[in-house]
Image (spheres, helix red, strand yellow):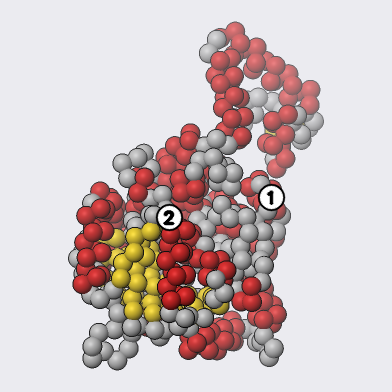
Amino acid sequence: MSTRRRRGQGGVTYDDVTGTLRERTVKAMRDPALAANLRTAGTAWAEQRQVMEHEYGFNEMRDRARDIRRSNIRELPALLTELQHNVRENGGTVVRAADAAEACRYIVGLARARGARTVAKSKSMATEEIKLNDALEDAGLEVVETDLGEWILQLANEHPTHIIAPAIHLNKEQVAELFRAESDGEVPDDREGLVAHARTRLREKFAQAEIGISGVNLAVADTGTVCIVENEGNARLVTSQPRIHVAVMGMERVVANWDEAAHILQVLPMAAIGYDAANYVNLISGPRRDGESDGPEEFHLVIVDGGRGALRGSEFEEALSCIRCGACLYSCPMWRNVGGQTYGSPYSGPIGAVITPLFEGPSSPGSRDLPFMSSLCGACGDACPVGIPLQDLLVKARERSRSPEKTKAGWAFRLWSLMWRQGITYRVTIAAWRLGLRIRGKDGWVRRLPGPGAEWTRVRDMPSRWPPRR
Ligand code: SF4
């Protein structure tokens, strides 16, 4: 896991992801602006999503989406071979990268070979995952994020807080402040004015960029087409304006044909933003052809494994079905309270808590506690448009974790289980518990428990009679 993020222009060194997960969580929970911004975003999503579920029979759509994605993952090697073949037939180049280093090496090498100086990027979680911006900036390139949210984060030196709404944790006053720090001229206060300001600044960069880099929402194997879903139109410019287009995808993002793609492309915006269609769906099947008036001269598709291949056939295989809609984040009571940056990894929320330790290894210090960032309430599994049983995967991920949390909790539960298996020790512990509560209690409540119980009473009181009176 990265401890330092360096993005943006001028080789600026950016903020550290510091502290333990617990420390970051406590810090986030003490930030009233963050709480208000996340609440606004989460409420808007929940309301819109409810309308969608009601109008479109979302549950039936989810069943089909789940079947499609499971079949895609089962057939993954064959689909990737077909995709690779068809992209090449269309005049594109395909590179299979085993890991982040290999993917970055290829893209940096390409930029150097073509003498590129400026790269325009559209939003892409895969490039976040492989830390492509760092690699490009280390090679002396200027990287410009052109998605409004990502550009805001680039100015703020921050990680995305959400898969599809990266700067949702910031309000317009905070955004205006960032724009003012970046700009010599006047910056308006209102939302429309801020968007117009960003548009003007970013348009200049499209004209300069020699390379455009995008992510991929889906790749269709039987035509060799990549689909990029967006709401701002910047991905359309990134993929058509510069001379070279590089698309970066996780290897699992492939579907067999257009029938499957059409269904997933319908389910994705419904789950993600509660609308029945995204503003733009870009379909790209290779570079510009003879007689075409626009499009890039070169198209490169970089397919990253990054630990995904090893998940096929494992108890975590279903995690590969994810279409990165972000619905599980909005539905998660933990994420809604602390936001995605607390997780310290590109992927946050329930899906991030499952896949980050899988991609980085269960003993990776930054990721081993992540599976415990869940109340296991099951809301994430209900929200998932491809039916991933996230709560079950989180439990499995906890079993794999070598977290100190797990070790401590494991010993405590083992001891508890031993004591409560015998009637006598059960009765003794219950009597001791009741007596302890009565001694510490005042006016019917215990304000502070000692030892491990202190965590419970840090945010709530405990009734001093057990069981509590109804
Ligand atoms: S796990 Fe499901 S809900 Fe979460 S991002 Fe992936 S597809 Fe969306």
Left or right, 193 with reference to 110: right
Q: Image quadrant of residue 5?
A: bottom right
Q: Nearer the viewer, residue 465 or 373?
A: 373
Instruction: Say if mark 1 contacts mark 2, CB within 8 Å.
Output: no
Q: Nearer the viewer, residue 412 or 112?
A: 112
Say which residue appears at 68% left-offset and 53% top-offset.
18
The numbered mark at residue 99 is 2
Is residue 81 in view from this perspective? yes
Left or right, 245 with reference to 26: left
The C terminus lies in which quarter of the figure?
Answer: top right
Q: Image quadrant of residue 467?
A: top right
Q: Which residue is mark 1?
A: 19
Q: Count numbered badges in the picture.
A: 2
In primary-sequence order, the first of circles 1 and 2 is 1
Left or right, 281 with reference to 32: left
Say which residue appears at 56% left-offset and 15% top-offset.
418
| Residue 466 vertical placement versus 339 (above, below) | above
Q: CA distance from mark 1 to mark 2?
A: 27 Å
Select label 1 or label 2 by which is in front.
Answer: 2
Say which residue appears at 56% left-offset and 52% top-offset.
1
Task: Check disc 2: other Cα within 10 Å, few if <14, some if 14-19, many if 20+.
Answer: some
